[in-house]
Amino acid sequence: MTTTCLPDCGVARFLALLNGPWATLIVRELLAGPRRFTELRKALPGISPHTLTSRLRQFEAYGIVTRTAYPEIPPRVEYQLTDHGERLRDVLDTMADWALSIPEPEPVDAA
């Protein structure tokens, strides 16, 4: 995987690192603790193996996630947030609180 230069602006950098709808959901799942690839796929219905692999590799490259391969048969690989990745907990909690504070829209009268 090729890493790219990150923007200087903090918000733009955040969006570059957590791009796409799956990135924050993967982090959300890893906030509960180490997960295997198959556990992440099961928790994220609709994500393709390619997308999950790509996001995990990107997170690993930027020090957000660690990948640990255990020498077992069958092989076992676990993904876990680093201390730096763990710091996203407050960000996601704040995002969730904000989103849940938005009221449902009023029904539109179709006249």
Image (tube, rainbow, N blue to C red):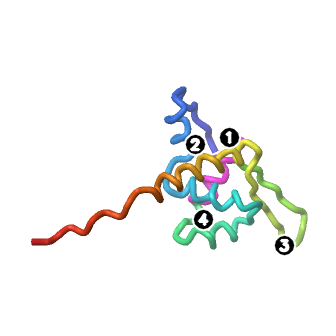
10 Å crowding of disc 2: few (<14), some (14-19), many (20+): some
Instruction: Give the amino acid at mark 4.
Output: Pro
Residue linked to disc 3: 74
Within the magenta stretch, is there residue 68? no
7 left or right of 69 in image: left
Q: Earlier in the sequence, mark 4 or mark 1?
A: 4
Q: Which residues are magenta?
A: 51-63
Q: In this rendering, which labeled residue sits more in front, label 4 or label 2?
A: 2
Percent x, y for residue 98? 48, 52
User: Outermost residue, left direction?
Assistant: 111
Q: Can you say which quadrant of the picture contains the C terminus?
A: bottom left
10 Å crowding of disc 3: few (<14), some (14-19), many (20+): few
Are the residues flagged by discs 4 and 1 in contact, CB closer than 8 Å?
no
Q: Earlier in the sequence, mark 3 or mark 1?
A: 1
Q: In this rendering, which labeled residue sits more in front, label 2 or label 3?
A: 2
The Cα atoms of the two marked residues, 2 and 1, are separated by: 8 Å
How many numbered discs sit on the rendered protein?
4
Residue 54, above or below 107: above
Helix or strand or loop: what does disc 3 sit on? loop
